[in-house]
Amino acid sequence: MYEIVEGFLEAARLIVTLDADVMAIALRSITISLTATVLAGLVAVPLGAAIYFGTFPGRKSLINLIQTLYSLPTVVVGLLIFLFISRVGPFGFMRLLFTPTAMVIAQTVLVLPIMTGLTISALSGVDPVIRDTLRSLGATHLQFLANVMKEARFAILAAVAVGFGRAISEVGAAILVGGNIMASSFASSTRVLTTAISLETSMGNISESIALGILLLLIALAVNLVITTVQHR
Amino acid sequence: MIELEGVRKAFDSKEVLAGVTGRIERGEIFAVIGPSGAGKSTLLRLIDLLDTPTGGAIRVRGTDIHAETERSLSIRRMMGMVFQKPAVFNTTVAENIAVGLRFRRAREAAIREKVEEALEMVGLAGYEERRARTLSGGEMQRVALARAMVIEPAILLMDEPTANLDPVSVATIEDLVVRINRDLGTTILFSTHDMYQGQRLAHRIGVLMNGVFAQVGTPREVFTIPASRDVARFVGIENIVDGVVVGENGNAVVVAGGVRIRAAALPGPGERVSLCIRSEDIRIAPADAAMAAPGRNALPGTVASIVPRGPFSRVTVDCGFALSSVLAWKVVDDLGIREGSRVRVSFAPESVHAVQQE
């Protein structure tokens, strides 16, 4: 019991004094996951729109597949990317293993299905009367697509935010392809909040773990706040 | 303006429209009335090119609108539509109304001017910067109307525009419909399940039942000389008596429930008919009162029920079949009638409208 209280006090000190190591880890987490989120969003939003507005054979099955991949295990994604970029893999020559780039790739792949799927849901959520209204007002096909997307913008933003949440909170892929390295330079280190918590806890550094855990929660909270503020505007 | 020729629409195997034929003239207000599920919305959606008919043709200004696929955008842009459910885009009121103008690449100054005018028309001046989602249902529907009108359509389609609104908003929208038609000459086609709204607003009414127009006519025609038993029921004729026409001394009468009824106009003997008699045309007198004027139908009966309805009472008399009259409270008191009282029901033959049974 004492250890836990002690841990929280120490955690508070680490955060309040902006402990350099802790801040570096938090910043790296945000950088990597945000990059992955932006990349995934650039693919997922247009892809989701194409699937939603498109008519092609196997569309329903594709949507089902995408929804199944929501719960894609992070270690499986890690393993997959590992196989591709390890020395013996097809992209081994690029020497990406245990780099932040590898983590970005893994997290992008990881959140693509959920972002695409939620984009499709966001567009399906647009009131059919709104769609009819756009047509009845004489929208061309393109004007129609653009305005349905516009109407779903907040739900699409939420889809992207959910993707970010999944990226920053995952540990399996980060540890497999990142390796939890604490190197001398910021850019070549791969230690992020989740992998650090895992390591510190296993080494008995409870207070560090708690501090990192609180930061992770604060980031999630901040993202949530931004989303709700935008949505209520 | 709009010609409907045998318009059919089936969803899967269910036929909603089974050959609707009719004309909507330029500059008129035409109401499509009918019970829920009669296909009113479907008909309007077909006209606005939101759905494709499974048969027949719809011509607007002579053009078969569903045949000219490459011109469908310009055809649709002749029309504006307001839907039953008030729906606004998630932006400001001004932007909502501007959408159709932006689709047409109107200039910014023109947009601003027209939006202002449209808001003025629907009584929402000063609402430009309000978030449309925060408006009440009635206000949203007025925004929808302004949004449809700002593009100056030749035809305004309205699908049960007041079905979800409070009475004050209904009155506002109805007033706007009349003004738009009168001041701008817009041809207006609207649907409603409220027959009185049809009567209040429309120059002509089409009664849509079982997928076809059971009757098309002026409100007066539809309400006084319904074309069928179903139409009579829908337009609120409370007394519909089924019987058979028989010849009697050179005159035709109808025998119903063992009682003889004279009517002004009847088909030949042997025909099965439904007699429609408006309750306000029926008089009730005590059984021992002086005989009714000669020529009137006078039937003895027993009061079956007296049910209050607003400032009136609906008195139902069993004369072998039920006949109802609507009387002021005071009249009921003066007559001294209550359930079980013996009375005499009378009505003129001219008040009896006979429709042949199918």
Image (tube, rainbow, N blue to C red):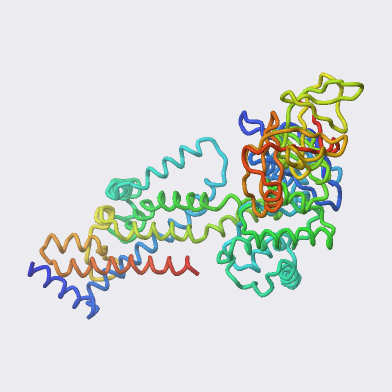
Residue plotted at (34% across, 58% down): A167
Residue A224 is left or right of residue B186, and the answer is left
The image shows residue B352, relative to residue A157, as above or below, that is above
The image shows residue B90, relative to residue A12, as above or below, that is above
The image shows residue B70, relative to residue A12, as above or below, that is above
Residue plotted at (49% across, 54% down): A45
Residue B134 is left or right of residue B219, and the answer is left
Residue A181 is left or right of residue B310, and the answer is left
Which image quadrant: the C terminus of chain B?
top right
Residue plotted at (73% across, 54% down): B80
The image shows residue B54, relative to residue B272, as above or below, that is below
Q: Position of residue B79 (x, y in %)?
A: 76, 52
Q: Position of residue B137 (x, y in %)?
A: 60, 60
Nearer-the-camera pick, B223 or A37 = B223
Nearer-the-camera pick, B185 or A176 = B185
Q: Quadrant of residue A160?
A: bottom left
